[in-house]
Amino acid sequence: MIPSAASRATPPLRLLPVYTGATSIDEALQDQRGVRLLWLEVLVNDRLDLTPWLERREVQEAYQKACRWYTTYRSLIQTLLSRSPLPDDPGPVDPREYRLFAEAIRFVATHD
């Protein structure tokens, strides 16, 4: 599957359109801000199919980061969002990003 076809087949993004204006994974990957915030989209949107982009380092890193945040804040996320679990990754999270994480979770929880 080519990425442009994948972006049309991927369910709508929940967070990136508001934060960056990107309406597809392809658009997000073309913008530095989209790349930096992709982990949040992965964290809040369990309908994403990232398969067409998994060979990209940015997507791999975003997925791993989302898994780490999900592992660390699983109870909070499960309480506020309806999503399937991400794989456990007990690696470290950067506490300086907590405010961004909290804002994103709150936004999605109130706009669901």
Image (spheres, rainbow, N blue to C red):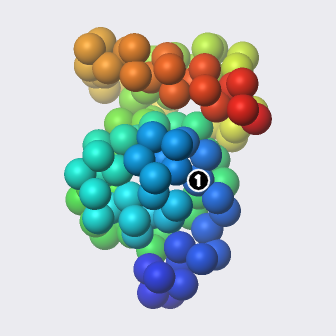
**Location of residue 33 in the rendering, given as x and y in whole percent from the top left corner:** 29, 46
Q: Nearer the viewer, residue 91 or 23?
A: 23
Q: Residues within 10 Å of mark 1 (few under 14, many from 20)?
A: some
Where 49 sits versus 110, above or below?
below
Q: Which residue is mark 1?
A: 13
Total numbered badges shown on the rendered structure: 1
**Location of residue 105 in the rendering, given as x and y in whole percent from the top left corner:** 57, 24
Q: Secondary structure at mark 1?
A: loop
Q: Which residue is located at x 50 percent, y 20 percent?
A: 103
Where 20 sits versus 97, above or below?
below
Image position of 111 (left or right of 49): right
Specify the quadrant of the image occupied by residue 36: top left
Q: Which residue is located at x 45 percent, y 57 percent?
A: 22
Q: Which residue is located at x 61 percent, y 68 percent?
A: 10
| Residue 60 at least partly seen | no
Q: Which residue is located at x 54 percent, y 84 percent?
A: 5
**Location of residue 54 in the rendering, given as x and y in whole percent from the top left corner:** 38, 65
Image position of 23 (left or right of 31): right
| Residue 36 at least partly seen | yes
Image position of 27 (left or right of 11): left
Quick one: quadrant of the C terminus? top right
Task: Give amino acid for label 1.
Answer: Leu
Where 3 sits versus 75, above or below?
below
